[in-house]
Amino acid sequence: AKIAGRNTLRIFEPGMQVSLNARVSMEESLVMAIESNQLELHYQPQISDVNSVIGAEALVRWNDPKSGAIPPSVFIPIAEETGLIIPLGQWVLEAACAQIARWENDPVMSHLVIAVNVSVRQFHQDDFVEQVKLTLARTGARADKLKLELTESILISNAADLQDKMNTLKALGVSFALDDFGTGYSALAYLKLLPLDQLKIDRSFVRDILIDPNDYAIAKMVVALAESMGLSVIAEGVETEEQRHVLAGIGCHSYQGYLFSGPIPEDVFKKMMGQLGKI
Ligand code: C2E
Ligand code: CA
Ligand code: CA
Ligand code: CA
């Protein structure tokens, strides 16, 4: 058993070492990336029933000179653990607000509301509200063009702080969507205390909505809940016309997903909008 144990140790040790090294070097590269503008925002259109583009979700992209494109599913969790999500989140907020301000003078783009993902850790920074205010002022972005996407896990945090911050930002004109709704801990009673504007039906419920009655039931429940609370609702991960049709059938009339477009750079977005603002 001892020998097996030692063998096991020898087998796993090098691997663990490599992965730790990889993490540390990724952390260092990410610090560099934030400081030296290797990050970029892509925008995924959000579509209304009549195919007009009503907004976009800003999604961060990282092109590392050595490793190429690193997906957010890899570096966001590391950024969360290391606290780098704070400067990263601030970079994203700044870039999105600068984009809002540039599009403000463009008749084809000026109506778009830009949704920015905010991590729970970022939101609970003491100076978060102040940072948002400063960023809006510095960039000249209109607050009513900025939507903050909070994940459901925000609901288990300090209620007073959460309400306080949301109300202050709401008073400035900023709006709020609750992201990945239904995937985690839903403190339903708590929802009505918050100045939310929108629930996002998670991609995991949309994916099998045609074949899984449970997913269909959950999506339907989210739409009904949103409606009864006076919130709008948007479905993410819409990939097929059939999914869109079923969603429309349960009363969901805003969509985001590959059926319309993946996340794209600002110039591609602008070209796509053409003269009509339709897809
Ligand atoms: P999310 O907030 O749920 O973002 C939606 C993700 O779904 C994006 O992945 C998007 O590219 C992908 N997606 C969009 N439409 C479809 C579709 O039709 N089918 C499928 N299968 N996927 C679709 P992405 O860009 O890789 O981002 C992954 C996650 O990383 C995001 O999930 C979000 O949690 C996080 N993230 C991205 N950018 C930021 C950011 O700036 N700040 C923070 N805190 N998190 C971010
Ligand atoms: Ca999101
Ligand atoms: Ca989401
Ligand atoms: Ca999701």
Image (cartoon, rainbow, N blue to C red):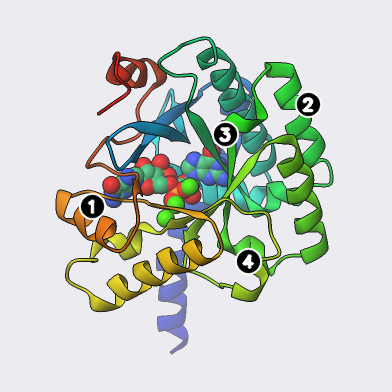
Q: Which of pointers 1 and 3 indicates the residue nearer the eye?
A: 1
- Label 1 belongs to which residue? 244
Secondary-structure class at tag 3: helix
Residue 75 shows in this picture? no
The Cα atoms of the two marked residues, 2 and 4, are separated by: 28 Å
Read off the residue under disc 2.
134
Can the viewer see residue 142 in this picture?
yes
- Taking 220 as reference, is 115 left or right? right
Distance from disc 1 to disc 3, alpha carbons, whole Å, reads: 37 Å
User: Residue 191 — which label?
Assistant: 4
Nearer to me, 49 or 188: 49
Residue shown at 58%/39% (left/top)? 147
Q: Earlier in the sequence, mark 1 or mark 3?
A: 3
For the view shown, which residue lies furthest in the bottom direction? Answer: 1
Task: Tell me the CA gap for discs 1 and 2.
Answer: 39 Å
Closer to the N terminus: mark 1 or mark 4?
4
